[in-house]
Image: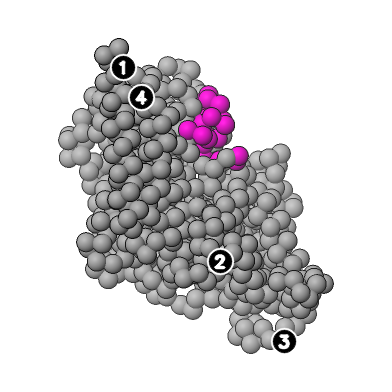
Amino acid sequence: MTETTPTDTGTTDDLIAEFAELDAERPARRLTGRLAAAVTVVALCLSLYALYQVFRPGQVLPYRMLLLAVALPLTFVCYRPGRRGGARPGIADWTLAALSLAACLYPLVVFDGFIRRAADPTSLDVAVGAVVVLLVLEACRRTVGWILPVVCLLFLAYAYYGGYLPIDWVVGHRGYDIDRIIVASVMGTDGVYGVPLDVAATYIILFTIYGAVLDHSGAGRFFVDVSLAAFRRSRSAPGRTVTLAGFLLGTVSGSGVATTVSVGSVAWPILRRAGYPPEQGGGVLAAAGIGAILSPPTLGAAAFIIAEYLRVSYLTVLVYATIPTLLYYLGIFLAIEIDARRYGTRTVEVDAPRLWPLLRRFGYHFSSLFVIVVLMALGQSPFRAVVYATLLAFALSFLDREHRLTPRRAADALAAGTTGVLPVAATCAAAGLIVAVVTLTGLGLKAGSLIVGASGGQLLLTALLCALAVLILGLAVPVTASFVIAAVIIGPALTGLGVTPAEAYMFIFYYAVLSEVSPPTALSAFAASAITGGNAHRTMLATWKYTLPAFLVPFAFVLTPAGSALLAQGGAGEILAAAAVSALAVAALAAATGGWLAGPAGPVERALCGVAAVLLLFLSPLPALAGAGVLALAIALHLVTRARERRS
């Protein structure tokens, strides 16, 4: 599709192999032969059962237990214990797989008695529960690294040793013994088998199945082709292409890093030929990659948890995200236009199909995305909506001879849906341990009161502290776990000052996602810099420039009464006004960070644009008018300065 040199192609292939697993931080085994076939069969059976549950739902808790009973053994078989682990499972792996199967099936075999004994567990209940906790932590370590398990252990230690803290400390409590901690972690609905795992067992596995079917049907290739064809002859076309491709591919991958690498493997040679420096090109790639996690119709895994916590439909969460998503992409496109002029980028001829013939031939790939939203709008549950969309994608695959889902390919796609959820299932189960401790000890309200106390009860300072806390947390743990931990610990600090739960959770969601592009461990930016060969730190800063609106707009959710309008709450006039003012603020931010208005902007004009953006984001009449006035002053000063430069 693109004109690349053999060196480009070889390097890209190597990077794809390296970074396809980077999002999980631990390499999965590349299984072959009979073992691969056996894993495919087991994963296929779980996918089929997940689909069956949509139409014939059983009891919730047994289903969560069954999912973990399959996911944990698969994890120990499919993931090495470390980067030096063997290509095939060893004795230790098989032992852990067998032990996890037995330990997770035990509650199912004695389910009624197991639930009744929660207040008075037997020694066997506690022993099996302890084994489940340890296995979950090991599975989590294999899939997403050691930091989240360590965080979980610190929380468990807090539950046990908290009674030794001084009585006058806010975070002190009476202390709990091992039996009580294990019961809270495994024998209730706030621990391993709590809401996070439920989200993995329902929403996430269905959407990973959908993404796998869509990818196997050729949609991924089509999304790249249509992005290349959409912006053919413009010096800003390469940047626009990357952004559109990132948005479309993100609906398939659901991962910021995976999307960054997938887009970068095709688009970086184009960006380079257009004249983008490596760091700026990497910034575009990383910003486009995480944009997909912030964008309807699939968003990220944490968005499903928001729906569960708020007891609202997933469609409602999609509505919440619509205006912030438009503002995010507006900021990226404006930054791309500025960089095209700033770096003097060139038009690049790309060997891609023409847009309209491509849409006529393969445009049906979009239909399943629309079906999800339409069905939810008509009152269908998100579970049924995504299953119907999956069936539609399967049926439409037969319109393409190369990618038709024959029984073998369909089985591979369904199995890929289950194996794709393994890191998420381990993460959600581990996050459940933290939720159990927070619930048991009351830490959420205590931590919230600490944050409010440190900020003196001022909402602005509280929001700043909360944003910083979520970003720091996100540097260490995956997005889903970061959101869950922050929701139960940091969320009460915001809601305690009058912020609605919807605004608080969306605020936390955005900062949990943005941790992927936040220095010093911005995973998406790191992956992009490896593809482009640019400096990792400067690539992170370039990504931060492109994503800056997403860092600042969430403050409008919580700081002003009109901020709820950005979540599409309120009257139509109020929503449109808030969106328009915020769009003007994003434009001012783009000018401030990009250093460009009608031409290169000086320090004074850029500073004025930055001040204008902040004032506009207060979304109140007086600050908005002041912001518009400051922006007008910046533009006038810029035009006068340029006129003087022309005359001199």
**Where does label 4 land, which residue?**
600
CA distance for labels 1 and 3: 83 Å
**Where does label 1 land, which residue?**
645
Tell me which segment is drawn in magenta: 520-542
The answer to whether any part of residue 316 appears in the image is yes
CA distance for labels 1 and 4: 12 Å
| Numbered label attached to residue 457 | 2
Q: Choose the circle earlier in sequence order: 1 or 3.
A: 3
Type of amino acid at the residue the image marks with label 4: Pro
Residue 632 placement, left or right of 133: left
Type of amino acid at the residue the image marks with label 3: Asp
Quadrant where the image shows the N terminus: top left
Type of secondary structure dominating the magenta stretch: helix
Q: Choose the circle earlier in sequence order: 2 or 3.
A: 3
Residue 23 placement, left or right of 345: right
CA distance for labels 4 and 3: 72 Å
CA distance for labels 4 and 2: 42 Å
SS of the residue at dot 3?
loop
Residue 448 placement, left or right of 303: right
User: Residue 271: image x %, image y %?
Assistant: 38, 25
The answer to which image quadrant residue 193 occupies is bottom right
SS of the residue at dot 4?
loop
| Numbered label attached to residue 120 | 3
Q: Choose the circle earlier in sequence order: 1 or 2.
A: 2
Q: Nearer the viewer, residue 335 or 376?
A: 335
Question: Residue drawn 69% across and 57% down?
Answer: 151
Residue 299 drawn in magenta: no
